[in-house]
Image: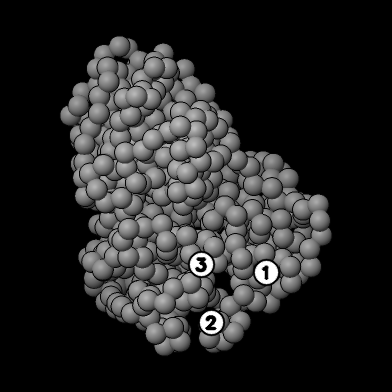
């Protein structure tokens, strides 16, 4: 894991090294172990390294191959790099390091643009081709690793975070109207290529981008997820066994491909508990596990220790149980928001931030259960969508959108009232998925788009804030592709995620398998009262908020008058949504 950055100028001038070093300063947390720059005429790269594979200096970046005329900055992990290395050696390539970065360089030289289809893992990288005088940038299939950029007539900037780009002082920070609509209707998901800022864009998952010296760009999608049945029909048992094999391999390789210890974030839910169980089958040494809990509210427990403790007991893990008081949550919330690459309203962001702080003291790599609900149909709103009537859009919108278009128009000030961008986007994405059944199309949308800019981004941001690499085996390419072809009826048996429940039976304690679906608890950001309400009121009534003019003040006053009365269909607090966006802008844009 690392932080990458770079500049390519189109006007023949040399980029200012201090600009890329400023970007690198914002990426130190993502790569605390080493940093360096590379410059070649109109291009400059900056890199911050978190050493996970090949801990030697030979694997430092930017990595330069003078013989091939290539330079790379890379963030991520390539799980099949050893197999690719062996294949490339048979083609005559030789290696100076033992890690995965150099393998990408040789793969690019061997296969050109098609190098990405050979890579299995999570990645965002940029290669400078000294001979072609061209940038090549790519992002992994599921968008697990971030890649932001900004392009004008004079230059192209890229980095792992928008905060790094903002340090250059050359970014249009006006609000993107369509992104604002997504922010308040799609649970703060703003699908690529947009971000909330007009001057910052992000590369779409499963896509590469080429940029030449004249500013000409070429973008191409290299991977599509197929949500259709395979040619050969499989029985339910065969489907489950297929997923079992793929998932076990995904867990094992995410443990094996590291030169440092690997732990597991154990929430007490089925997904993370199953990871512990599968890993226990593959290794004999102690498994490191970590759980976190918060203060209870009258309406909701703040922890799931009763379940995680059963998993710890079953597998005798080396466990770390962390309990955080609400006072710590509120005092540390500004830090967490500083590390959000984009404004994210998920209540568990600060939970992951505080958990990662503690976990990073013990390990540099963890496995996490993100993706299981989207891939295997675990959320409570999926059955509601199944039972609803109407078009695909109507069935989806009714149970997912945080606000109707009418309420959005009530939320924002007049200058931001425009078209129903979110309905148009979702209707197109559902239609483009090619899924045979409605729920095929819904899960395809979730896995390829919505998950990228909600739980996956949240976990990446909050773990990398502490130099902690999070690996997500449920988003392994093989697991995702097999699951997408599976009939939805199998996934939605027994209230959802049936394949995982079937795999876990006899391995994980039954109490964990049969418990009601839980969510990473952060009740203080749902039931807004006391100091948390004072905090949000101060933000929304601040001179900065009022002068920015994003919100309709009558709507703000309505929410402040009854802060617990206005909730979204996904059980989010609408007041928190407004406060979070404004506070993110204050801390990440106003202070840039």
Q: Where residue 306 sits: x, y (%)?
A: 43, 87
Front residue of 477/322: it is 477
Front position in the image: 230 or 373: 230
Q: Disc 1 or 3, which lies upstream in sequence?
A: 1
Q: Distance of mark 1 from mark 3, alpha carbons?
A: 35 Å
Estimate the x, y position of residue 393 in percent, counting from the top left.
Answer: 69, 50
Q: Is residue 495 visible?
A: no
Q: Mark 2 touching mark 1, by CB under 8 A?
A: no
Q: Nearer the viewer, residue 190 or 315?
A: 315
- Give coordinates of residue 163: x percent, y percent: 29, 41
| Image quarter (top left, top right, bottom left or bottom right) of the C terminus | top left
First along the sequence among labels 2 and 1: 1
Residue at disc 2, secondary structure: loop
Query: Looking at the rendering, which quadrant does residue 533 occupy?
Result: bottom left
C-alpha gap between disc 3 and disc 2: 29 Å
In this view, 265 is above or below 112: below
The mark lying in front, picked from 3 and 2, is 2
Residue to which mark 3 is pinned: 571
The mark closer to the camera, 2 or 1, is 1
* Tag 2 residue: 508
Total numbered circles: 3
Question: What residue would you read off at disc 1?
Answer: 241
- Picture quadrant of residue 527: bottom left
- Residue 530 visible here: yes
Q: Secondary structure at mark 1?
A: helix
Mark 2 → mark 1, Cα distance in angstroms: 17 Å
Q: Residue 359 vs residue 86: left or right?
A: left
Q: Is residue 134 above or below residue 399?
A: above
Q: Residues within 10 Å of mark 1 (few under 14, many from 20)?
A: some
Q: Which residue is located at x 34 percent, y 36 percent?
A: 73
The residue at the point 27 percent across, 46 percent down is: 49
Q: Residue at x 50, y 33 (%)?
A: 91
């Amino acid at each position: 894991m690392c932080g990458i950055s770079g500049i390519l100028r189109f006007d023949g001038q040399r980029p200012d090294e201090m600009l890329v070093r400023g970007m690198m300063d914002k990426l130190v947390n993502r790569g605390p172990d080493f940093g360096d720059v590379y410059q070649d005429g109109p291009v400059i790269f900056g890199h911050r390294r978190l050493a996970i594979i090949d801990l030697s200096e030979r694997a430092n970046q930017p990595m330069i191959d003078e013989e091939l005329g290539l330079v790379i900055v890379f963030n991520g992990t390539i799980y099949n790099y050893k197999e690719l290395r062996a294949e490339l050696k048979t083609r005559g390539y030789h290696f100076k390091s033992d890690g995965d970065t150099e393998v990408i360089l040789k793969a690019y030289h061997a296969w050109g643009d098609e190098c990405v289809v050979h890579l299995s893992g999570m990645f965002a990288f940029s290669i400078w081709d000294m001979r072609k005088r061209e940038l090549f940038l790519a992002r992994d299939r599921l968008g697990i690793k971030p890649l932001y950029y900004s392009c004008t007539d004079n230059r192209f900037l890229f980095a792992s975070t928008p905060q790094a780009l903002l340090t250059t002082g050359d970014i249009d920070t006006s609000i993107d109207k369509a992104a604002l609509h997504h922010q308040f209707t799609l649970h703060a998901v703003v699908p690529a290529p947009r971000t909330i800022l007009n001057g910052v864009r992000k590369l779409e998952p499963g896509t590469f981008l080429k940029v030449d010296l004249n500013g000409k760009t070429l973008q191409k999608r290299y991977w599509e997820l197929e949500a259709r049945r395979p040619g050969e029909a499989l029985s339910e048992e065969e489907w489950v066994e297929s997923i079992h094999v793929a998932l076990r391999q995904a867990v094992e390789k995410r443990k094996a491909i590291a030169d440092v210890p690997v732990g597991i974030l154990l929430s007490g839910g089925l997904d993370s508990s199953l990871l512990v169980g599968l890993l226990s089958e593959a290794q004999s040494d102690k498994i490191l596990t970590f759980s976190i809990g918060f203060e209870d509210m009258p309406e909701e427990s703040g922890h799931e220790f009763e379940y995680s403790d059963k998993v710890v007991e079953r597998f005798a893990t080396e466990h770390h149980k962390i309990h955080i008081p609400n006072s710590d949550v509120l005092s540390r919330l500004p830090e967490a928001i500083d590390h959000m690459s984009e404004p994210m309203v998920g209540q568990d962001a600060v939970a992951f931030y505080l958990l990662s702080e503690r976990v990073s003291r013990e390990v540099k790599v963890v496995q996490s259960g993100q993706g299981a609900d989207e891939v295997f149909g675990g959320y409570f709103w999926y059955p509601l969508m199944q039972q609803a009537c109407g078009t695909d859009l109507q069935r989806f919108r009714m149970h997912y959108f945080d606000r109707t278009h009418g309420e959005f128009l009530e939320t924002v000030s007049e200058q931001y009232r425009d078209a129903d961008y979110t309905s148009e986007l979702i209707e197109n994405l559902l239609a483009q998925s090619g899924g045979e059944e409605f729920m095929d199309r819904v899960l395809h949308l979730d896995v390829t788009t919505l998950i990228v800019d909600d739980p996956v981004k949240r976990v990446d941001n909050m773990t990398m804030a502490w130099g902690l690499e999070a690996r997500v085996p449920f988003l392994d390419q093989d697991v995702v592709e097999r699951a997408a072809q599976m009939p939805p009826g199998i996934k939605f048996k027994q209230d959802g995620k049936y394949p995982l429940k079937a795999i876990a039976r006899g391995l994980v304690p039954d109490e964990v398998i049969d418990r009601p679906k839980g969510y990473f608890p952060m009740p203080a950001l749902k039931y807004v009262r006391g100091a948390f309400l004072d905090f949000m009121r101060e933000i929304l009534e601040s001179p900065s908020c009022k002068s920015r003019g994003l919100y309709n003040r009558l709507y703000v006053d309505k929410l402040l008058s009854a802060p617990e009365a206005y909730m979204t269909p996904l059980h989010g607090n609408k007041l928190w949504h407004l406060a979070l966006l404004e506070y993110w802008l204050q801390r990440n844009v106003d202070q840039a």
